[in-house]
Amino acid sequence: MRRRPLVFAAILSVAILVPRLGFPAAALSDPAGNALPPGIQLSFPLLNILFAPLFDAWDGVTLLAMPRLQAFLTGVGALYLVWRTLGGIFGDQFQWGREVWALAAFVLGTSLFLVAGVRWHRPMAHLADVPPALVVVDLHSHSNVSHDVRGILQKDFDVAADQAWHRRGGFDLFFVTDHNRIDGWQRTKGGEGLGGMADEGPPVACPGEELSLWGAHIVVLGNLDSVPRDMYADSMPGILRLLGESESRWGAVTLASIPEYDENHFASLPAWIVAGVDGFEISNAAPKANRQTTAHRDSVVRLAAMNGRWLAGVTDQHGMGATVQSWTLVPRTTAGTHDRAMPALCQDVLHVLATRGHSATQVIERHRLRIDSAWPNWATVVGVAWEGWRAAGWAQVVSW
């Protein structure tokens, strides 16, 4: 019995070192295949390093697409059953009382892990050593004025909380893009509207809106008033009309959001480009959105490059979790003239997005278990650990 912890420790050490030494992966990459800016790296707070097994597990699970997340939870339950069965066969004599307590501890521990992972806005891994010529931005996030950020675990996620979340994630600027409304941002000092829920940074809060249209979600960035979605929501011509007149009529640039464009309008993207869409998300951390296949992503990357459209990696933050999947880098410049309608840095970023085409952005993404990884769904639990260890820094490895 005394040897079991040593045997387990030895097996775990080998399991960590094999992927890290034999199959290493970069912690950060550009999904478009470009080189990263010199010196940029993923930095972990001390608490994340000291308790790497726990924090790495939270990060790995948070970055799963919904089908993978469901498979992970099923796999955890299956591993528990295997563990208790083998213990009954090779261990002590079976006792109902002991098994009931073990099951209760398992259910409680799993529930605490999930609730804490969703609810605790804990220290976060973030980009470090970003060149000063670049602005780290998030082009898609939500506050609790959105209809799907009003659950019991998210109801206090106002713009001030959204700002604090992005600060921990290493952002200089974020857009508040609530569903079909803009009053979340208008309550900030930047909006000069309803009492100042958040200061002007860093990070700086910028205006935007996510419009629910005909099987599509289009994020508009830079509009100071809510766009009346009913003008565009009923058909494909309505979507194309919004893309064509968003800048002239609403002073906004447009970003096509996933999963909607990927699942409902993938064949229509060339028409969206002709109509005037400005950019495409190719990384979105929301579990329901994080299921774009590598083949579809690469197709969008090529399409954007050929047609001078920029790409974005977004958090789509809804007040849950504390893990950033991707960051968007925008060249730091001055738009020329500024007005008081919104913070100057917002105007500078919008100017770059509106004028520089494909070169306006670079996406930086964390390594993770993707939806179309070679790991089958039933092996998601193992795949999360393996992919995490492949990209772990040595301080994390030592902590494990």
Image (cartoon, grey):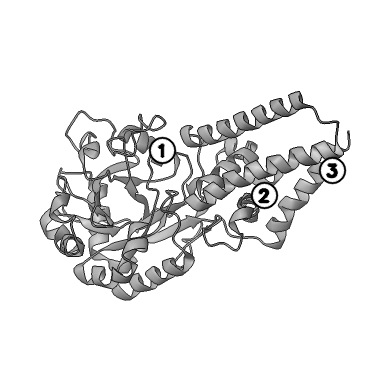
* Disc 1 to disc 2, C-alpha distance: 26 Å
Residue found at the far top of this picture: 97
SS class, disc 1: helix
Labels 1 & 3 near each other (Cβ < 8 A) = no
> Which badge, 1 or 2, comes first in the chain's sequence?
1
Mark 3 residue type:
Val
Q: What is the distance, in whole Å, between disc 1 and disc 3 at their CAs?
A: 40 Å
Mark linked to residue 222: none
* Residue 65 in view (yes/no): no
Nearer the observer: mark 3 or 2; the answer is: 3
List the residue tagged with mark 3.
Answer: 7
- Which mark is drawn over residue 165? 1
As drawn, is 192 to the left or to the right of 179? left
In the rendered image, residue 176, in percent from the top left (x then y), is placed at: 29, 43
Q: Position of residue 324 (x, y in %)?
A: 46, 47
Q: Earlier in the sequence, mark 3 or mark 2?
A: 3
Q: Is residue 124 above or below residue 305?
A: above
Q: Residue at x 48, y 32 (%)?
A: 120
Question: Can you identify the residue that label 2 sits on?
Answer: 394
Specify the farthest residue to the bottom.
306
Amino acid marked by disc 2: Trp
- Answer with left or right where residue 13 lies relative to residue 330: right
Pointer 1 or 3: first along the chain: 3
Q: Residue at x 74, y 23 (%)?
A: 97
Image spot of residue 128 (x, y percent): 49, 49
Judged from the image, the secondary structure of the residue bearing numbered disc 2 is helix
Residue type at numbered disc 1? Trp
Residue 356 visible in the picture: yes
Residue 359, quarter of the rendered image: bottom left
Residue closest to the eye, 71 or 180: 71
Q: Quadrant of the N terminus?
A: top right
